[in-house]
Amino acid sequence: MYKTRVLIISERKEQSIKYKKLIEAENQDVVVTNNLSDALFVLQKQEIEFIVISDTIKEKLSDFIKKIRVLTFNSRPIIIAVSKSNDLEDKLEILDSGADDFIGEEITKQEFQMRFKAHLRRYLESFLNPITYLSDKNITIKALKKSFETNENLAYLLIKIKNFDLYKKTHGEIASEKVLQTLGAMINSTTAQNDYSGHIKEDEIILITGNYQAEKIASFLTFAFDNILNKFYSSNEFENNFTIQSDDNIKEIKTDLIRLNIAIVEKDKTDYKAIVNKLNELIELCANKNSSNYIIDRFKLNGEISKKEKKVLIFEPDNALSYLLKNVCEMNDIETITTFEKEDFLKAYKEFKPNVVVLDWGNKKESDNLEIAKFISKDNIKLIFSSSYLNKKEILQAGADLYMPKPYEIDDMFYWIEKFLN
């Protein structure tokens, strides 16, 4: 749950203590001041979302509320005015000056608490995503900032729906909203009252929880998401484990099914921006998995990442085409080996350990290179499969990351080689 910050301004100590206890009982943070100069200082230094102000202050209440509205123009806090006056003109003047509510001092503790809860509910609901019922980016950034003001041992989860944009493009708004709605319900069902969850992007959610709960939550969400994945696809798509968007005459990168990727980082001595950057870096390591998964980074285990190698293995029976591809790659500082026979290819694959493989269908109508593709896909090596026989479904089913129909332009092929290397 998101904690708002409430400022109470009153020169009567007993009144401040009473309101403070009632508001803190609703799990909100409270700051108390008894003079105007301190109140103005707090408003300038902290982002206050609620102000409870009593007419015990020396300045006229309506005039001071007008000043607050000017000072807090960007944040626009909820202002609750408390007064001992029951005069209608006083009430109207205070409300007209910018107060959101007028409360008489004679009201009971229960009524004060209920009024505050009503304002709190409306405030938080105004920032809810209408599909997931999780908070939007504005509140999420505030929650991240506030989490660094406590001494709690916290963990941050970045929950991302892999391939969501492609799914939305292929299956439409209604289907993609159903995915988000389901994920929102899953998160709400697994988090505790003191946890926070909210959007940082449409398909990315930040969850803040205790250190010990983080991995349990990630494990549950990834398991549950994969177990309901079939509800978002046709039976044919789900069985194939990918989606085909165009016909055999057009090249197509393999569009895998949506998955849930989760990165977990424990709070250290940095700030919220560093946490978000670390989460974004970490979640990239989940991208190559074929199922929903999570990864944990504990800042004590940070290490240096070695420079990535660039190796390409080409199996292309056309000598001229193979020669051109090899030259283009080597001119761009990419180590390249070309092969023309199956035995040579398998030997080179084992010894060379390429990052990207370019594999041709071959000269036969029924190519055994499909079996090679299945073998390569188990190693999570990026595979570009070219073919003049136009069997897109078979090729993608065999594990290719990109289907490239022949004839193709050398520049086009190199673009994808470089993209997969990077």
Image: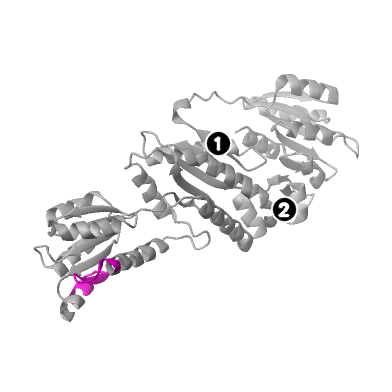
Does residue 405 appear anywhere in the picture? Answer: no
Compared across the picture, whether 164 is left or right of 327 comes to left
Determine the residue positioned at 82% across, 21% down. Answer: 344
- Residue 298 lies in magenta, yes or no? no
In the image shown, does 161 or 364 lie closer to the viewer? 161
Q: Is 154 above or below relative to 93?
A: above
Quadrant for residue 86, please give it.
Answer: bottom left
> Of label 1 and label 2, which has the lower sequence position?
2
Give the position of the C terminus as an image quadrant: top right
Residue 295 is labelled as 1
Q: Give the number of callouts.
A: 2
Which residue is label 2 attached to?
A: 245
Residue 375 is labelled as none
- Residue 96 lies in magenta, yes or no? yes
**Residue placed furthest toward the top:** 351
**Residue placed furthest toward the left:** 58
CA separation in Å, label 1 and label 2: 31 Å
Classify mark 1: helix, strand or loop: strand
Determine the residue positioned at 75% across, 31% down. Answer: 376
Specify the amino acid type for callout 2: Gln
- Which residue range is magenta in the image? 93-110
In the image shown, does 80 or 17 lie closer to the viewer? 17
Q: Provide residue 322's location: percent of width, then percent of height.
A: 77, 29
Compared across the picture, whether 271 is left or right of 55 comes to right
Determine the residue positioned at 68% across, 48% down. Answer: 257
Q: Is 31 above or below relative to 371?
A: below
Q: Provide residue 235's location: percent of width, then percent of height.
A: 76, 55
Does residue 52 appear anywhere in the picture? Answer: yes
Specify the amino acid type for callout 1: Ile
Quadrant for residue 385, please give it.
Answer: top right
